[in-house]
Amino acid sequence: MFTGIVTDLGVVKRVARGEGLALTIATRYDTSLIAIGASIACSGACLTVVAKEPGVFSVEVSGETLLRTTLGDWREGTPVNLERPLKLGDELGGHIVLGHVDAVARILERREEKETVRFRFEAPQDLSRFIAEKGSVALDGVSLTVNEAEGCRFGVAIIPHTLANTNFGQAVVGQRMNLEIDPIARYLARLVAVGAAPHHPHL
């Protein structure tokens, strides 16, 4: 479990393609403290560390993750938002983020507004009902509040700290980002759907 508060901006150092995808990512984390088998959110996707060296760690990407995320597009030099898992007792500074990417959202607009930058995104139609004004989303692993939502399009505002410490600083129109909807919205929608279903008592 994560919070969507990015704690390091890493970079892809090596990409190995075969039956799957293996990535080596450079980080400022002290890799001596990262156990093999540990989970790290890499631009929103929870991945397992399979190897490490000083200053870098390696992960393998499953076919399911490749289908739902942007990871298949990553190249050497791609910036990666990193977050280590939440520990019991840690401050929940963002919102509950599972690291299970639902789909990819595309940047439609980037607009400078004084110190902040407003981004407008387009999400898949089937996820639009989970995205509401003042609700939460995670984009490339960054916990954000939705400022506006209409249909499958929504907007967020990015503050200078986030611009400087995540890949949003380099984000451009047309770029795709990993989208995870708020799990609470998902569970509420499921409860409403179940409650609305016809009840057929046993005879």
Image (cartoon, grey):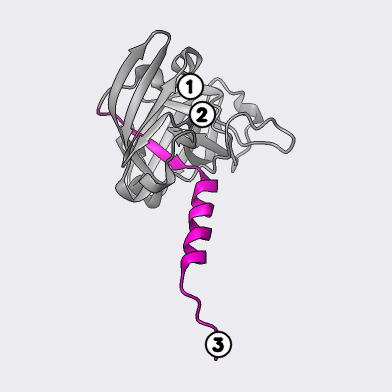
**Which residue does the numbered mark 1 point to in the structure image?**
9
Q: Position of residue 95 (x, y in %)?
A: 57, 35
From this viewpoint, is residue 124 visible? yes
Q: Nearer the viewer, mark 1 or mark 3?
A: 3
Mark carried by residue 82? 2
Magenta residue check for 185: yes
Q: Residue at x 56, y 27 (%)?
A: 5
Left or right: 170 as drawn, with respect to 163: left
SS class, disc 1 = strand
**Which residue does the numbered mark 3 point to in the structure image?**
202
- Write down the region rendered in magenta: 174-203
Q: Position of residue 51 (x, y in %)?
A: 53, 37
Observer-nearest of 181 and 29: 181
Residue type at tag 1: Leu
Residue type at tag 2: Leu
Magenta residue check for 145: no
